Amino acid sequence: MAALPPNSFEGGDDRFPAPAFARAVLAPAFGLSQAHHLGHLMTMHRAHGVMLHEQGLLSAEDIAKLLRALAAIEADLASRSEPVAYTGEHEDLFFYIERELARHVGVDTAARLHTGRSRNDIDHTLFKMALKERLDALVAQLTGLIETLIERSVRDARTIILAYTHGQPAQPSTYGHYLGAVIETLLRDAERLEQARQTADLCPMGAAAITTTGFPLNRARVAELLGFADILPNSYSCIAAADYTSQVYAAIKLMALNLGRFAQDMAFWTSFEVGQLRFSDGFVQISSIMPQKRNPVPVEHMRLMASLTAGRCEAVLTALHNTPFTDMNDNEHEVHSQGYEAFAMAARVLDLMQGVAASAAIDEARARANISRSFATITELADTLVREEGIPFGRAHHVAAQLARAMKESGDDLGTVPYARFAAAFAETCGRAPKLSEARFREAASPENFIAVRKLPGGPAPEALAEAATRHRASAKRLRDRLAAHAAAAKAAHDKLAARTGG
C-alpha cells in the first residue's frame, strides 16, 4: 500500500485516531487485512453465526438475515476494482464489515453476531487459517522439488563425482549419493513444516478476549466448520501463545538455510576450477563484454532468495522476541504480513531450484580428472591393504601417504604411477613385498571400486542407493497423502458450512 501523505486525516491528537496513528498503523493494517484475510473473516462470520443459531443464541430469522447480508457484502467487495480505501471512519476491517452488516440488517441484529467473541480470538484464527493454506502450498512445492531430486538421484546413481570436505577434494562418490543427502535434509524440512501446521491447526475461537465467555458457545463446532483439527484447549494460550507463528517461521528459516547450502554447492561445482556440474543453456547468461563466459547466475539468485527468505523469517522471530505472554500487536497483522513475504520468496527459490535440478548435469570426465589429480581414491587403497595384506591401518595409511608424496613429486596419479614405486613404499614400511598384484593395485585405486565396496546403509554403492530411493519415494508419497488429507478436510469443512448457510 502506498504511503499516505502527512496531512492525511483531519483532526488533532485529542480524538481517536490521531492522524499519525491512522497513517502509520491503521491505514496499512486495513489494506493488509483486505489483502490477506478478508475471505477468512467472512467464512468465520458465517461459521460463528451458524454455531450461535445452533446454540439458541441467534434466531432463525436473524441468522437468515445475517447470512444474506454477508453474501451481499462479500459480493460487493469482490466486484470492486480496488480495495476499500481507509478513511479513518472505521478502526479496522472488522468494524467496517460490522458497519456494513448494520446497514443491511440493522444495528441490533448485526451486533448479535459478535456474541461471545473478541477481535483477539478472531485475529489469531484468521492468521492460523492463512498459515495453514500457505503451509500446504509451500509443502506441495517442496515435495515437487524432492520428487525431482529423487528421480535425478536414481538416474545418476552411477554418475561419478568428487566429494569435497573443507573446500578440498576428499573422496569419490556419485551424484545420486550426494542428492540423497539433500533429499533427506529436505524431507526433514517438510516434517518440520508439517509439525508447525499441526500447531496452527488448533482453533482459538471461543477464547474471546482471553478467558472464554459465559455464553454457551460450542467451540468444537466452530473449529469443525472452519476446517480445524480441534480446538486449542486453554483460552489464555489461544491469545497469548505465539508459538504457532514462531514455529512456522523457524521451520521455514531452516528450510531456507538448507536450500542456500545446496545452492552454494552448485556455485562451487560450476566454477571453472572445479567444473563438475554444468547447467543447461536456458540457465546460463552470457557476459555483455566477454564472449567466452558462461555465467550460471541462477545459483546466485537461489542463494539470494534463500537468504531473503531466512531474513524475512528472522524479522518475524525478532518481532516476537522478549514480548509479554499475553495478547499483543507484536503477533498481529503487521508481523504476519512480513511472514507472508517469506512464503512468497520461498516459493520463488523452490520453483527455480526445481527447474535447475531437473536439467543440470555432471561433467563426469571433469570429475574423474579431478579425482585423479587429487588422489581421492587413495583411502580405499589403504583399506584394501588392511583387508588383503593383513597389516594394521596405521601402516597401510603410511604406505599410502608415502605413495601420495611420490606422486606429487613426479606428477603421476594412481593410474600412471609405476607399480614398482608402490611396491617399494610397501616394502620399506612392512619389510616384505606386497601380495597385491599390479592389476589388483590399479583396480583398488579406481573410482568404481571405491564406490562399489561402500555398501553399508547410506553409502554410495548401487545397492545402498536403491534402498535409499525406495525409502525416499515412500516418504514423498506420505507427503502427498498428507496434503491430500488436508485438502479433503478443508473441502469437508467448506461443504458442512455451505450446507448450513445455503451457499
Image (spheres, grey):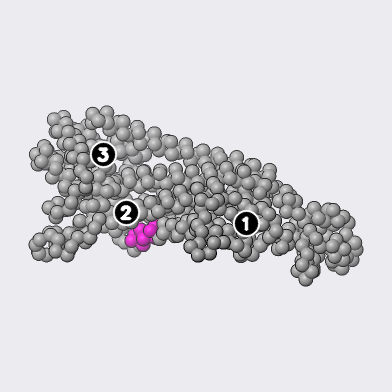
As drawn, 289 above or below 469:
below
- Locate residue 270, reporting x and y percent: 58, 58
Quadrant in which residue 116 is drawn: top left
Q: For mark 3, does the 10 Å Cα neighbourhood hold few (<14), some (14 to 19), or many (20 or more) residues?
A: some
Q: Which mark is residue 43?
A: 3
Amino acid type at circle 2 is His
Magenta stretch prevailing secondary structure: helix
Residue placed most toward the observer, 259 or 226 = 259
Earlier-in-chain disc, 2 versus 1: 1
Asked whether the viewer can see residue 94, the reply is yes
Label 2 environment density (alpha carbons within 10 Å; few <14, some 14–19, many ≥20): some
Residue annotated with mark 2: 336
Does residue 76 appear to the left or right of 152 in the view shown? left
Tell me the amino acid under the disc marked 3.
Thr
Which residue shows up at 40% across the image and 38% down it? 486
Q: Are marks 1 and 3 in contact (CB under 8 Å)?
A: no
Find the magenta span and give its range.
312-320
Left or right for 45, reference 452: left
SS of the residue at dot 3? Answer: helix
Q: CA distance from mark 1 to mark 3?
A: 53 Å
Cα separation, mark 2 vs mark 1, equals: 42 Å
Q: Amino acid at mark 1?
A: Gln
| Disc 1: which residue | 276
Residue 367 point in image, percent of width and height: 67, 56
**Pointer 2 with pointer 1, Cβ within 8 A:** no
